[in-house]
Amino acid sequence: MEFFKPLSTNTNESQPKNNSEIEQTKCLIIGSGPAGYTAAIYAARANLKPILYEGLQPGGQLTTTTEVDNFPGYPEGVTGPVLMENLKQQALRFGTDIRSGYATSVDFSKQLHTVVIDNEKTIQSPAVIIATGATAKYLGLESENKYKGLGVSGCATCDGFFYRNQDVAVVGGGDTAAEEATYLAGIARKVYLIIRKDYMRASKPMQERVAKTKNIEILYEHQTKEILGDENGVHGALLIKKGKEEVKIDISGFFLAIGHTPNTVVFKDFLKLDETGYIITTPGTSKTNIQGVFACGDVQDPHYRQAITAAGSGCIAALDAERYLGNL
Ligand code: NDP
């Protein structure tokens, strides 16, 4: 089925002359984390001539981390920004048209899907791959922002390794906090688990794992007032116990585990989301409830949230899109 006018192989020629013109493409990718770029590499190699919009944070969450030691293929490790630049270059090498801009509205009600970029440019495509990721929640403290990447992290599996035999803190009382605290306990000397209520929200088995781990100290009814540090990074945190008493802990790492927000607001009128806002895909595929709309990476994954799992699901999305287009 013909959904769009044939485009020139020269991507520059496919650009509209002005923003009011509707542009059509065969495959549109929204988001530029490991999922988006991997989808682009596969889609471009399959000659789908993908257009990729980078979104609000080009390169995604990994651009805010330092060393990435667990992405296969980098025996000496790699920094987050370098890894993302490498993925971008690989996507460009096969002809991906990478552009800045983010999706401000969509219409997935017809077979030819419509996406508006930056409230002004309309682009239509029969295959849309959503890779908009998720954003780790932060407490919103000024000191937290100041020491991001210098001891403050939203991902223990990414950054925990750097705190071998040191003391660290994890904030949160859910499954992520319990998981991150037990993970860090295997690396760090001591882990403080800072919980604002007098109980943990985490599931029973996770609570039991935490309770069994000797070097985790749970601080119930504690809230973080300030993260303390200097030019070398974090060296402590000031907590408030039961709303009044100030407590200082000495730590070199401060990990947030108070949840993630999937970046799906713009899609919510069309796509089925779970109760926390993640896009629901058919298990084992990237297919959403709308034909021709695929989701990959953290935007549809509340559980693993790793660069490599995101990249793998980006590959799946491109293959699903290619097959879908082949059957039209
Ligand atoms: P949750 O929303 O379940 O928990 C967030 C935690 O952070 C809560 O304890 C909450 O406190 C706390 N919190 C939120 N805001 C603040 C704040 N401003 N200051 C201090 N504490 C705060 O998020 P998770 O990421 O833990 O889990 C998300 C989903 O993923 C859940 O459904 C979970 O079960 C699932 N998951 C499953 C895993 C597994 O099965 N292995 C692993 C990880 C996640 P309060 O309780 O007071 O609201």
Image (cartoon, rainbow, N blue to C red):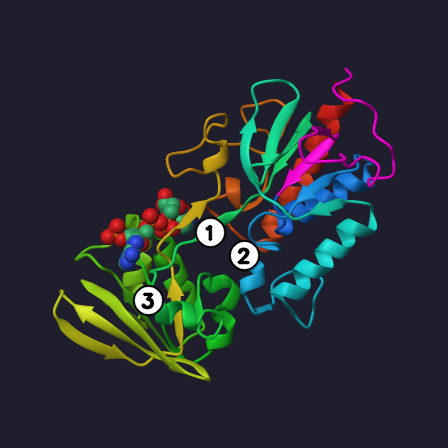
Magenta residues (range) = 1-30
Q: Earlier in the sequence, mark 2 or mark 1?
A: 2
Q: Is residue 83 left or right of residue 272?
A: right
Which amino acid type is marked by label 3? Thr
Return the residue at label 3: 213
Which amino acid type is marked by label 1? Thr
Within-10-Å neighbours for mark 2: few <14, some 14–19, many 20+: many
Measured from the top left, where is residue 64 in percent x and y?
Answer: 54, 63
Which amino acid type is marked by label 2? Gln
Q: Residue furthest right?
A: 9
Q: Quadrant of the N terminus?
A: top right
- Marks 2/1 in contact by CB < 8 Å: the verdict is yes
Secondary structure beneath label 2: helix
How many angstroms separate mark 3 from mark 2 (CA)?
A: 30 Å
Q: Is 23 part of what is drawn in magenta?
A: yes
Measured from the top left, where is residue 184 in percent x and y?
Answer: 42, 68
Q: Is residue 140 visible?
A: yes
Secondary structure beneath label 1: strand
How many angstroms separate mark 3 from mark 1 (CA)?
A: 29 Å
Return the residue at label 1: 135
Q: Is residue 89 left or right of residue 31?
A: right
Q: Is 109 part of what is drawn in magenta?
A: no
Q: Disc 3 vs disc 2: which is toward the camera? A: 2
Measured from the top left, where is residue 227 in percent x and y?
Answer: 33, 74
- Marks 3/2 in contact by CB < 8 Å: the verdict is no
The disc label shown at residue 61, or none: 2
